[in-house]
Amino acid sequence: MFLEPFNSPYPFYSNLSDNQKSVYNSIKSSIDSLSYIDVQGNDSYVMLYLNELIQKLLTSSYLKNYYTDKIKFVKDNYKAEFLQLYCALWLGDIYFYFDDSQNALDSWVDALNPEKIWTLLSSKIISLKLNENIPIAAHEALTYKKNITKNKKNNMELVVKYVDQIIQ
């Protein structure tokens, strides 16, 4: 199949040419059936698919497992770094939304890169762990930069205690 190049940081179906729409529909059909299709570096097709999937989930939450299976499939089969990251983040958010704290944490921690500072993700992890009385790992605290949530402010002594224990 000829893949017309499609690389956009914010992909929208309305921005696709007729040929790109045809390619996208083939890719969408393939992923829907959990069948891998090589997008030849045109990962925006997959990102568009994921964006549409998240929108559907917000309007039909009873299909949570159906949608999370699709996201897991993309995460397992499409290796572009930004797709891996967004899949892990969205899975964590979906699990959290449906009160599945352990899977949310597992997914978010999977996305956390100890070599980068990512305050939003670290904040999610630390806040959920504080709320659930789960010890915080050093890399989770150390990738946290400057934003302090109300939960962390109220529990800063506990955050410091956990980091101290880990460092020792």
Image (spheres, grey):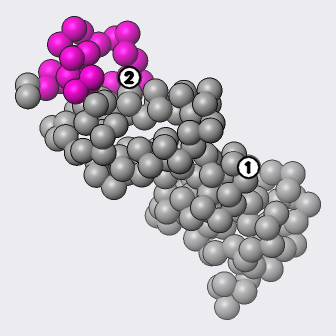
Q: Is residue 131 magenta?
A: no
Q: Position of residue 149 (x, y in %)?
A: 81, 51
Q: CA distance from mark 1 to mark 2?
A: 30 Å
Nearest the viewer among 138 and 107 is 107
In the image, residue 18 lies at what x, y percent? Answer: 22, 8
In depth, the one of 66 and 75 nearer the eye is 66
Residue at 37 percent of width and 16 percent of height = 13
Q: Is residue 150 above or below residue 4?
A: below
Amino acid type of the residue that numbered disc 2 sits on in the rendered structure: Pro
Q: Which is more toward the observer, 22 or 128? A: 22
Q: Is residue 33 above or below residue 4?
A: below
Left/right of residue 11 with respect to residue 88 in the rendered view: left
Going from N to C along the chain, the mark reached first, 1 or 2, is 2
Residue 154, compared with residue 42, is above or below; it is below
For mark 2, give the secondary structure.
loop
Q: Residue 147 shows which numbered tag?
A: 1
Q: Secondary structure at mark 1?
A: loop
Other residues around mark 2 within 10 Å, as few (<14) / some (14–19) / many (≥20):
some
Dot 1: within a 10 Å radius of its alpha carbon, few (fewer than 14), some, or many (20 or more) residues? few
The region drawn magenta spans: 3-26
Q: Circle 2 sits on which residue?
A: 11
For the question of whether residue 37 can be seen, the reply is yes
Residue 80 lies left or right of residue 4; in this view the side is right
Front-lying residue, 130 or 24: 24
